[in-house]
Amino acid sequence: ALAVQIGQLINYNELGQISRYDYITLKKYLNILEKTFICQPIRPFFSNRRKEISKNPKIYFFDTGLRNYIVSNFNQLDKRGDKGQLYENFIFTQLLKQELKINYWRNKNQAEVDFIVNVDNQLIPIESKSLANKSTLPKSMATFLKEYQPPHALILGDEEYPASQREKTLVHFIPRWFV
């Protein structure tokens, strides 16, 4: 069930129904998976608890080969329904290698940014998206930029586009493979 939920909020209710474990036991097992470098939860970033959701973590796998084995899917990326999840998990592992504190952001209106990292006391939002063109800034990212006004933001997608200024934020459009 966790392997299907990569890049999504951990749904303890669903996991409990599938596994028939209670919440405390699930938390203990998730802790074991984290300590043995199978899965890694990331916690939400927030500055205003009233406007932003600050509950469940999102889950990622350290080894997508193990994850693919669990879900029995080794198809090429262009033939997979979970391609976006795998890209997002890839970005997570690359950020982890940089030894950055990684969070995600989500508000009560369901706006969500995949990753928020803090570099030299500056927030950098990172979104993994396939964009039709660079003028299409994801709504969730635009909401975050308006709220926090970070100096830089990253959109990691299929193609590279020139950076563009969005109010106080320079948005960089970088191909995923560059990460």
Image: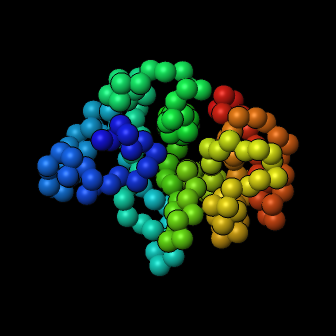
User: How is this picture coloured?
Assistant: rainbow
Q: How many marks?
A: 0
Split into 4 quadrants, where in the image is the C terminus?
A: top right
Q: Residue at x 25, y 44 (%)?
A: 30
Task: State which quadrant residue 121 falls in.
Answer: bottom right
Residue 169 at x, y percent in the picture: 77, 59
Split into 4 quadrants, where in the image is the N terminus?
A: top left
Residue 20 at x, y percent in the picture: 14, 49
Q: Is residue 123 left or right of residue 66?
A: right
Q: Is residue 27 left or right of residue 177?
A: left
Residue 148 at x, y percent in the picture: 65, 67
Residue 42, visible in the rendered structure: no
Q: Residue at x 49, y 36 (%)?
A: 82
Residue 49 at x, y percent in the picture: 46, 75
Task: State which quadrant residue 142 falls in.
Answer: bottom right
Task: State which quadrant residue 29 falls in.
Answer: top left
Residue 44, visible in the rendered structure: yes
Q: Is residue 36 left or right of residue 3?
A: left
Q: Residue at x 35, y 37 (%)?
A: 3
Q: Residue furthest bottom?
A: 50
120 shown above or below 55: above
Q: Is residue 121 left or right of residue 57?
A: right
